[in-house]
Image: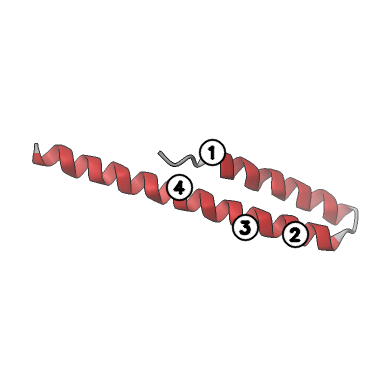
């Protein structure tokens, strides 16, 4: 099973870090954290898609039995 929670929490943490860096006017660091958040969000989306595909495959398998 692919874990969706870890990248979701990492995205949340990166967004918080981005916010605080922007408040401190450290915009380069804020943009780095923003890119991390985007990457982690994409990983979360991929994990959720995988979970949906697995659920669909299990339902189809159960129907053929």
For marks 2 and 1, give the CA distance.
21 Å
Q: Looking at the image, is mark 3 or mark 2 earlier in the sequence?
A: 2
Kindly indicate whether the residue at mark 2 contacts the one at mark 3 (C-beta within 8 angstroms).
no
For marks 1 and 4, give the CA distance.
9 Å
Residue 23: x, y in percent? 87, 53
Q: Looking at the image, is mark 2 or mark 4 earlier in the sequence?
A: 2
Q: Is residue 62 above or below residue 25?
A: above
- Residue for point 16% across, 37% down: 62
Q: Left or right of 25: which side holds 18?
A: left
For marks 2 and 4, give the CA distance.
23 Å
Q: Looking at the image, is mark 4 or mark 3 earlier in the sequence?
A: 3
Q: Left or right of 46: which side holds 57?
A: left
Return the residue at label 4: 47
Please identify the residue farthest to the left as the structure is shown.
65
Q: Looking at the image, is mark 1 or mark 4 earlier in the sequence?
A: 1
Q: Looking at the image, is mark 2 or mark 1 earlier in the sequence?
A: 1
Return the residue at label 1: 5
At mark 3, the secondary structure is helix
Please identify the residue farthest to the right as the structure is shown.
24
Residue 9: x, y in percent? 62, 40
For marks 4 and 3, give the CA distance.
14 Å
Return the residue at label 3: 38
The image quadrant where one finds the N terminus is top left
Label 1 packing within 10 angstroms: few (<14), some (14-19), many (20+): few
Kindly indicate whether the residue at mark 4 contacts the one at mark 1 (C-beta within 8 angstroms).
no
Q: Which mark is residue 32?
A: 2
């Amino acid at each position: 099973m692919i874990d969706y929670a870890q990248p979701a929490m990492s995205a949340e943490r990166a967004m918080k870090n981005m916010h605080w860096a922007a408040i401190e006017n450290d915009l380069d660091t804020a943009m780095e954290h923003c890119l991390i958040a985007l990457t982690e969000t994409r990983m979360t989306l991929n994990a959720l898609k995988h979970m949906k595909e697995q659920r669909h495959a299990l339902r189809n398998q159960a129907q053929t039995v």
